[in-house]
Image (tube, rainbow, N blue to C red):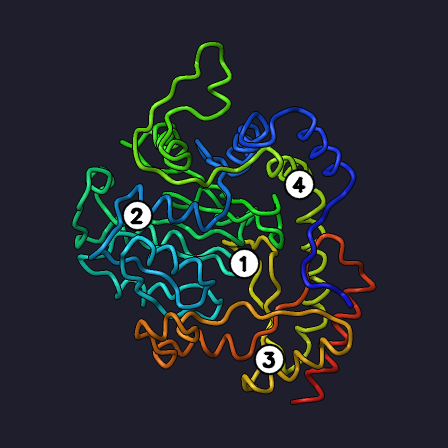
């Protein structure tokens, strides 16, 4: 069986983790701080805070911005549940917007969804293909409906753009790296992501003046450590044991063990990981673009280049039932595939909140026809060919 997305773990990563275990620093320490700095350099942002998951990172930012009951946060209907769950955790209302042909949020519908209650927009870079951040940033800067409820909101003076960039580490939009495309971006380093720390995430801070991104980093760092004004590394200084709790915070820090995996992965990210992913995409495209039943994904345009996280193959004029049968056929022949994602209104918790899939026709159309194909660094050319043949045979059996 060809697996769908195993992590790339080599001897250098193992040695780096062992070095951490022997160092005495297994929680947040020097390697986490080094990883933060390396991410900031890679993404060209002032500050990055590493945390234990992208989900925690998104919620932490929402709470820092003062999002709560009575507020609205605009999100796409086509995304993983985490994007909506963090909004619900704050007591705010998720406002779902249908997707576009490229799976990302429909910008025109997003604009229409803005009200006086809108505090944040969370665009999601599905499969690693960036959203249209020029348009999104223009919309929030020109919108005059915004009403601030907190000092932080007043300081920004507009809707916050918080990118759910879980898929898009390494993606490029108009010459700039993902992470630097809007106010704040949050990456995921979960086991199946391009860059992994087993679990984990990062908050990239790119806030405009008059914000000081270092000050925001310091606050979020404290907020992620129970509101404690000194982390463990700071307390190692002689006589520096005393600390204070400034706010009733949360617990969501990254550990040095996790950062060790990420440091090695980042070292070879462009030269090996992204390079191989691009090769796999091109091999898929070379065959599937010639199939009259296939819709191949957008992954490189004049303005955008994907992180090559997922290859989302759509089958023309097919039902959800037949798509599911095709997937079973593919699995039965030794290839693991997936579906990214079930639109949120299909899931019980959001149905109970009153969301109806009929209101999101593009999202449903994309979902019922999509099959996510394996893309990862250790996938061999032989295995790629097996995926292509197996998928093609399964589809052509049912159409």
Q: Which residue bears the numbered disc 4?
A: 265
* 310 w.r.t. 227: above or below: below
**Lateral position of residue 164 relative to residue 115, left or right:** right
Mark 4 touches mark 3? (CB < 8 Å): no
Q: Secondary structure at mark 4?
A: helix
- CA–CA distance in space, label 2 to label 3: 36 Å
**Lateral position of residue 197 relative to residue 162, left or right:** right
- Which mark identifies residue 301? 1
Mark 1 touches mark 4? (CB < 8 Å): no
**Crowd band around label 2 with a 10 angstrom C-alpha radius: few (<14), some (14–19), many (20+):** many
Mark 4 touches mark 2? (CB < 8 Å): no
Q: Nearer the viewer, residue 382 or 64?
A: 64
> Which of pointers 1 and 4 lies earlier in the amino acid sequence?
4
- Furthest-top residue in this view: 238
- Which mark identifies residue 315? 3
- CA–CA distance in space, label 3 to label 1: 22 Å
- CA–CA distance in space, label 1 to label 4: 26 Å
The part of the image, by quadrant, that contains residue 249 is top left
- CA–CA distance in space, label 4 to label 2: 31 Å
> Which of pointers 2 and 1 lies earlier in the amino acid sequence?
2
Residue 122: % across, % down: 37, 55
Mark 2 touches mark 3? (CB < 8 Å): no
Q: Which residue bears the numbered disc 2?
A: 160
Q: Secondary structure at mark 2?
A: strand
* Quadrant location, the C terminus: bottom right
**Lateral position of residue 147 relative to residue 11, left or right:** left
The part of the image, by quadrant, that contains residue 347 is bottom left
Q: Secondary structure at mark 1?
A: loop
């Amino acid at each position: 069986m060809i697996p769908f997305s195993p992590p790339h773990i080599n001897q250098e990563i193992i040695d780096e983790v062992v070095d951490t275990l022997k160092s005495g620093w297994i929680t947040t320490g020097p390697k986490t701080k080094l990883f933060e700095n390396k991410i900031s350099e890679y993404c060209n942002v002032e500050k990055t805070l590493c945390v234990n998951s992208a989900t925690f990172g998104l919620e932490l930012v929402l709470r820092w911005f003062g999002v709560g009951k009575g507020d609205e946060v605009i999100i796409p209907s086509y995304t993983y549940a985490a994007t909506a769950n963090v909004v619900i955790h704050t007591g705010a209302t998720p406002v779902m917007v249908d997707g576009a042909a490229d799976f990302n949020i429909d910008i025109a519908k997003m604009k229409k969804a803005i009200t006086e209650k809108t505090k944040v927009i969370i665009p999601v870079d599905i499969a690693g293909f960036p959203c249209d951040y020029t348009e999104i940033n223009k919309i929030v800067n020109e919108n005059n409906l915004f009403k601030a409820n907190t000092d932080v909101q007043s300081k920004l003076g507009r809707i916050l753009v918080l990118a759910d960039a879980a898929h898009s580490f390494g993606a490029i939009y108009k010459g700039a790296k993902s992470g630097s495309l809007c106010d704040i971006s949050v990456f995921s380093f979960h086991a199946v992501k391009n860059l992994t720390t087993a679990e984990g995430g990062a908050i990239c801070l790119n806030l405009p003046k008059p914000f000081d991104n270092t000050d925001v980093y310091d606050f979020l760092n404290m907020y992620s450590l129970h509101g404690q004004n000194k982390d463990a590394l700071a307390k190692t200084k002689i006589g520096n044991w005393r600390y204070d709790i400034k706010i009733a915070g949360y617990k969501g820090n990254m550990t040095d063990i996790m950062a060790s995996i990420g440091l090695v992965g980042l070292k070879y990210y462009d030269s090996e990981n992204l390079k191989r992913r691009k090769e796999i995409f091109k091999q898929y495209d070379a065959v599937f673009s010639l199939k009259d039943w296939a819709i191949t994904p957008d992954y490189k345009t004049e303005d955008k280049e994907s992180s090559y996280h997922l290859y989302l193959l759509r089958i023309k004029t097919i039902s959800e039932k037949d798509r599911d049968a095709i997937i079973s056929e593919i699995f039965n022949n030794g290839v693991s595939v997936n579906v990214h994602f079930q639109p949120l209104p299909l899931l019980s918790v959001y149905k109970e909140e009153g969301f109806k899939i009929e209101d999101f026709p593009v999202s449903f159309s994309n979902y019922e026809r999509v099959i996510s194909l394996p893309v990862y660094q250790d996938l061999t050319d032989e295995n790629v060919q097996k995926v292509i043949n197996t998928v093609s045979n399964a589809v052509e059996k049912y159409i």
